[in-house]
Amino acid sequence: MDAGGKAVLDSDHDTDAVMFYETPDIAHNTTTPGDNSGWQYEGKFMTFLGVPIAPHFFITAKHFGGSVGTTFDFHGDLYTTIAVHNSPNTDLAIWEVNHAKPFPTWAPLSSGAQDIGANAAIFGRGTRRGDLVTVGGQDKGWKWGTGDDVKRWGRNIVEGTVSGGPTLGTLLYCDFNRSGVADECHLSVGDSGGGLFVLEDGLWRLAGIHYAVDGPFREPPSGPSFNGALVDCGGLEYKNGPNWIPVPEDTEDVTSSFYSSRISSSITWIQSIAATASATLLAPENYTAWSKLYFSPAQIANPTVSGMSADADADGIVNLMEFALHLDPIFNERVTMTATTGLRGLPLVKVEPDGGDERLTIEFVRRTAASGSELTYVHQFSDDLVTWETVGTESISAINPRWERVKVVDAETTTSATKRYARIRVIAD
């Protein structure tokens, strides 16, 4: 038990599925969250998850094993494993896939700079929420329920790190709070290998791979042992090695936690196996590569679903524009980007003061020239919706190597032109 009162479980108690504080609904968060927070990078490996981190490599948990030759299912596309590289001092394993079929793109890695305190995106598959646990008439949380292997997402705050010793390395941990964030979640058996993603410099980056949870628990002095997602362990005992340790009842909740192997602490080892896995060098990403993060091979073969001019999620935004504006093509959403800080969304058009006059402005995100997008963005203004001109003053704010924020101020004022319109054209090169 560490100084924070958390018992880190060994591999006999590996984790396996996202469970929520706010709802037992088995359909909750079983489709994309729509914010590109990591769902698109999760693939299925046996009954667990893994994340591509380089053209021929994906990363997952070591403790559940696996055999070379097993396939990795990435959005319905199967990749055959040819080798496994186990970390000597963490629970991480990097699996190598057939080099004749590389991943088209892969997840960026966290540098660690924004891990602690992050509102993280959590992914896993496994059990549903089970029976309510009560002690002395107080609700404590839930036992693990039945497993269904369904991929789910949730959110939680990364509280800090604990040391797992020479064989587990540094672990990130999140508490399961009664008054937590929206979609507050805990893990259970089946979430092993799933990713913990944090938002760093405008990109969701892989910061952890799920390893374990607190537990098992029992009611003293010798109640039956159980695993559970508990918001309060007070009045119970938890098992630490061969011993049962009492947790005193308190006026404040004594939360249980889950633990994920920290990626940034293993970056040297990761890059010794997969040299292009990086927090700074991002995968080049054109439309073809990007589409494979969201569509199955059958959908890719059907241009009415995955083609640039198709609208897969029926939100009125064609797939090409979803790619160009950092939107999710399978999430029905018409969101306009936020001025000055926006990372995704439709262009923001508004009238703004300029000296003693006013001008129309248009603000949008675009993929950088170095990102490999093969796109050209053209801003245009018009006073009649017929004749469009590429005019105005452009300013650019860098977000990260893949994205930048652009604002264009019209050449005309509202005095010189009583009607003005703005638009962005995106051309696939």
Image (cartoon, helix red, strand yellow):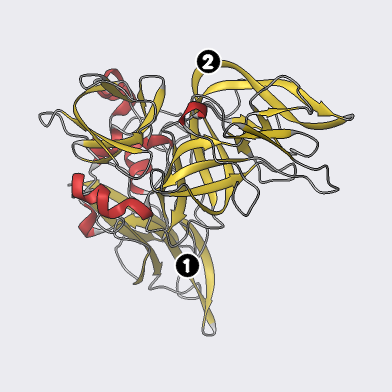
Task: Pinpoint residue 418: horizontal percent, then vertical percent.
Answer: 50, 67
The amino acid type, in three-letter code, at marker 2 is Asp
Q: Nearer the viewer, residue 9 or 211?
A: 9
Picture quarter containing residue 214?
A: top right
| Residue at point 69%, 46% (across, down) | 180
Disc sitting over residue 368 in the figure: none
Is 68 on the left-hand or right-hand side of 362? Answer: left
Is any atom of residue 368 visible in this view? Answer: yes
Q: Residue at x 51, y 51 (%)?
A: 336
Query: How many labels were placed on the picture?
Result: 2
Image-quadrant location for residue 230: top right
Q: Residues within 10 Å of mark 1 (few under 14, many from 20)?
A: many
- In-image side of 236 versus 30 (left or right): right
Tell whether 282 sits left or right of 261.
left
Instruction: State the image quarter where residue 254 is shown.
Output: top right
Compare marks 2 and 1 and give the one earlier in the sequence: 2
**Residue indicated by mark 2:** 148
Residue type, numbered disc 1: Leu
Counting from the top left corner in percent of width and height, residue 377 is at 28, 55
Q: Secondary structure at mark 1?
A: strand
- Above/below status of 154 relative to 306: below
User: From where the camera sits, is residue 274 visible?
Assistant: no
Which residue appears farthest toward the bottom when viewing the image? 356
Numbered badge on residue 360:
1
C-alpha separation, residue under disc 2 versus residue under disc 1 = 52 Å
The front one of 139 and 5 is 5
Crowdedness near tag 2: few (<14), some (14–19) or many (≥20) residues, C-alpha within 10 Å: some
Image position of 287 (left or right of 236): left
Q: Is residue 187 above or below residue 111?
A: above
Q: What secondary structure is marked by label 2?
A: strand
Closer to viewer: mark 2 or mark 1: 2
Residue 328 coordinates in the image, percent (x, y): 42, 38
